[in-house]
Amino acid sequence: MDGNNPPLPLAGIRVIDAATVIAAPFCATLLGEFGADVLKVEHPVGGDALHRFGTPTARGDTLTWLSESRNKRSVTLNLQHPEGAQIFKDLVAKADVLCENFRPGTLEKWGLGWDVLSQINPGLIMLRVTGYGQTGPYKDRPGFARIAHAVGGISYLAGMPKGTPVTPGSTTLGDYMTGLYGCIGVLLALRYREKTGCGQYIDAALYESVFRCSDELVPAYGMYKKVRERHGPHHNDFACPHGHFQTKDGKWVAISCATDKLFARLAKAMDRPELASSSIYGDQKIRLEHANDVNEIVRDWCSSLTRAEVLERCNATATPAAPLNDIADIFGDRQVHARRNLVAVDVEDLGETIVVPNVVPRLSETPGRIRHLGPRLGEHTDEVLKEVLGMSDEQIGELRAKRVI
Amino acid sequence: MTKGARSAKAASQTVIATEGAGAQSSPPEEALAQLASEVVSEGDTLTNEASASPPGEAASASPSIRSGGAYAVRGPLPERLSEHDRLPLSGIRVIDVGNFLAGPYAASILGEFGAEVLKVEHPIGGDPMRRFGTPTTRHDATLAWLSEARNRKSVTIDLRQKEGVDLFLKLVAKSDILIENFRPGTMEEWGLGWPVLRAANPGLVMLRVSGYGQTGPYRRRSGFAHIAHAFGGLSYLAGFPGETPVLPGTAPLGDYIASLFGAIGVLIALRHKEKTGQGQVIDVAIYEAVFRVLDEIAPAYGLFGRIREREGSGSFIAVPHGHFRTRDDKWVAIACTTDKMFERLAEAMERPELASPELYGDQRKRLAARDTVNQITIEWVGSLTRDEVMRRCLEKEVPIGPLNSIADIFNDEHFQARGNLACVEAEGVGRVVVPNVVPTLSETPGRIANLGPPLGNATYEVLRELLNISAEEIKNLRSRKII
C-alpha cells in the first residue's frame, strides 16, 4: 500500500494463529496489519472453517477468508498427531503470541495446555477465546457470536417493542468485538512481558465482550431494577429525537439530538425554530415526556422530503443526521473514498481484484498495511518449516507423507 | 514481579459480599464469611498465585475480580507501589479530554490496566456524560458516568481561555497519552493542534475519535454512535426485510467499538514511541470502526454487486440460525453454523432423519429450504418451555442460548461465577453494580479502583504536585474560573 515502508511497530513479533473462524483470528489479523508475522496453523484437511464461511470464490476460499486472513502465512499441521504436536511446540518456542479458540480442555487433551506451553516458552502470551470463557458452569457449552449476542444481552434489545428480537445488525459482531478485546489483552501482556519477562494468558469470552458494551444497563438494573426492553427504531430513554425516520423516496435517515443545542439545530433545519423554544420542546426533559409527539413531527417532516433533501438541510444546520447506508451507498460515498476505507487488492491466483475494508485504526507515523489477502491452505508450510524450524526438504516430505502437515 | 506484589494486589482488592441487587446463591452473611477468607494481608505469600497456571482454574487467578457467588465489592483502592508494579500500564499517564464515550472508553481500559487517567473537564458542568442517562443522588453523576468514568481523577481546566490552554500544555508535557473527541478543528481553534502538542511533548500519543475522522469532506459534521451505525452500514441491516430498520441493540455500540480500535492504536503507538521516541496521532472515525467489523459485506458487493439486506432474526450464512420463541413466551438463539450442529439439533428434536443427506443434512439444502427448516424449528421450540428447549439442546451440544434481559443476566450463575458484575462503592451514592473489566488477563488482571469521580476532585492535587503550581496561584486560577 505504501511506497516507503517504515518498520512497523510489531515487526519482529511472531504470532501463531491456531484458531478458527473470526474472533481469535481477528486479533491476529490486527497484529499482522501492524507488522507481526502471523502463522496461520491449520488442519491439513480443510483447514480453518473460515475458508468456507460466507460467499465462495472461484479459488474455493470465501470472501470472508480472503479479507480477514490478510497478511497471514498458512501452515498445515495436524495437532492430533504426536509429531504434529511436537512441531507445534517447536513453533511455540519461537513465537511471542498464540491465538486459539478450541473448546476448553481440547489443547490440554493433545498435551498442549497452558502449563506445557508456558514451560516451553515462559514469555508466551496466549489468547484463549471461547463462547463462555475458560471457567464457570457453562464453559463447555458450544458458543458462537449469535449465542453470545443472546447471552450477553444485546439481542434482547434489538427489534420492535414486544416483536421478534432481530440480529443486532450483523451476526459476527460479537466475534469482532472479542477479537478487539483480545488484541488489547495481547498488547497489554506484551508490554508486561517486556518489563518482566513474564508471559500470561488472556481468557476472553464472546458473551463478555458484548455484555461489557452495555452503557448503564447493569447499574440501572442494580439500583432501580429497570429492565430495558426493545426500542424498535427509536431509543428515547435519554434523548429525543434519536431514531430512524423514513424519507419520501422510501429511504431511511438516522437523526440524533443528544442535547438541546442539537435539537435547536434540527428545528432550524425543519424551518420551525419555534419548536426549540423553552415553552415548546426546547428542553430534553419535555421532549422525552412527549417523545411520540416529537417523533411524529420529525417523521412528518422527513416523509415530506427525499433523503438527499433531509440530509442537505440537516447538514446545513449541523444537525447530526446520516443516511442508513447500504453497501452500495457506502461504495458511492465521497467520505469513504476520501478516507480510503475501501482498498482493492489483487489476488493473483484468483485473477480477481477484491475490495476489502482497509486497516482501522489509522496511525499517522506507522500506518498498518495489507500486504496480501488470505493465503491458500498450506501455501507457506514449507517456507515456514524451513525458515523457522530449519527443516530440510526430506523432513518436510516425510511429514507430508505421514499427513502430519 | 514478586509474590509479595501479588499478595498486595489481592489484599488491596479485598472482597466482601453484599446483598447486591440480584439473586444470591447464599445469604449475605455466609458469603461474607466465605469471601473474607480470601483476604490476604500484605506480605503474605500464600495467595491464589499458583492457580494461575492450570487453565481450568483461571477464575482464582484474580480472586477479587472473579470471585464467585456474590458480587465483588471494592472500596477505593489505596495507592501501593506494589500494585502499580504489576500492572502493564503502571507509570503511564493519560489525559482524557473527551466527552461521552467514544474515545473516553479507551481511557477507561487503559486505566483498568494501571494507567493514571486524568479526566480534564470544563469547570462548569464538566463532561456532559455526567448528565447523560439515569440520575443518581449525586448531581454530578448519572449511572452511566459512574460506570464508564471509572478509574479517573477529575481535573477542571477551561480550554477556551488562554491560561487554560497554557496549563493544559504543561499537563500534556508530563503525560504519555492524550485522548480527545471534539469535532475536528476544535482543538486547533483553541491553539491545541497537533504541531503545538507535539512541540510540548514529542513522544505524545494522541487518540482522536470523531464521527467521520480528521480528514475528508464530512470531517466537520457532528457524529454520534447512532449516526455512525447508520453511515457505517450497520443500522441498515437490523430489522426485518422490507420493514423499519431498528437500533442494532444498544445506542452507543459504535462508541465502544471505536474505543476498542482506539485503545489498540494507542498501545501500538506507545510501543513505537518507547522504541523510537516518536509520538503520533491515531485517527479513528466511529463509522469506520463500525464498517470494519461487517465481515464480507464489502468484498461481496465489490465482486458480485450483492447488497446485503435486513435479515430479521436470521442470517445469510446458515439455517437454522436465529431467534425462536418458546412456549412460555421467552426467546432462545440457535446457531447451526455447520452440518454437524444441525445433526445435533435434529437429535435434540428426536427427528434425526432431518439431518439425512436426502432431507436437510447439507447446509446448501437448508439454505435453499430456509422457510421450511425455520418453520420446523419454530414449531418444535414453540412446543416447549425455554428451560426444556435449553436442556434438550445442551444435552446434544447444540449451540443455544437464552435471549437474556438484564434481569436474566443478574440471575445467571455463569455471570456470577465469572465475576462479570462488580459491585463498587461510589462516593456519595453507595454501592453500584457495574460490568467488570474485560478482557481477563491471568497475571495482570485489570481493576476498578474507583467509579466516576466528582467534578474537579483532583484539580488541586494535580496542579500542586504534578505541575508545581503554588497554592496561592491555584486559588487565583480558581477565582478566575480557569480551573
Image (tube, grey):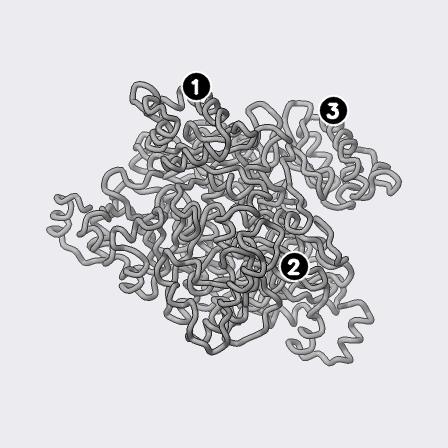
| N-terminal label among 1 and 2 | 1
| Label 2 CA crowd tier, 10 Å (few <14, some 14–19, many 20+) | many
Q: Is residue A300 left or right of residue B306?
A: right
Q: Nearer the viewer, residue A251 or A154?
A: A154
Q: CA distance from mark 1 to mark 3?
A: 40 Å
- Amino acid type at circle 1 is Thr
* Chain ID of residue with mark 3: A
Question: Residue B432, position in %: x, y?
Answer: 64, 56
Q: Secondary structure at mark 2?
A: strand
| 1 and 3 marks in contact (CB < 8 Å) | no
Give the vertical position of A209 relative to B3 (above or below): above
**Residue found at x 65% / y 72%:** B170
* Chain ID of residue with mark 2: B
Residue highlighted by disc 1: B372
**Residue found at x 48% / y 42%:** A148
- Amino acid type at circle 2 is Arg
Q: Are marks 1 and 2 on the same chain?
A: yes
Numbered badge on residue B316: none
Residue B222: quarter of image: top right
Residue highlighted by disc 3: A304
Residue highlighted by disc 2: B431
Front tag of 1 and 2: 2
Q: Secondary structure at mark 3?
A: loop
Q: Are marks 1 and 3 on the same chain?
A: no
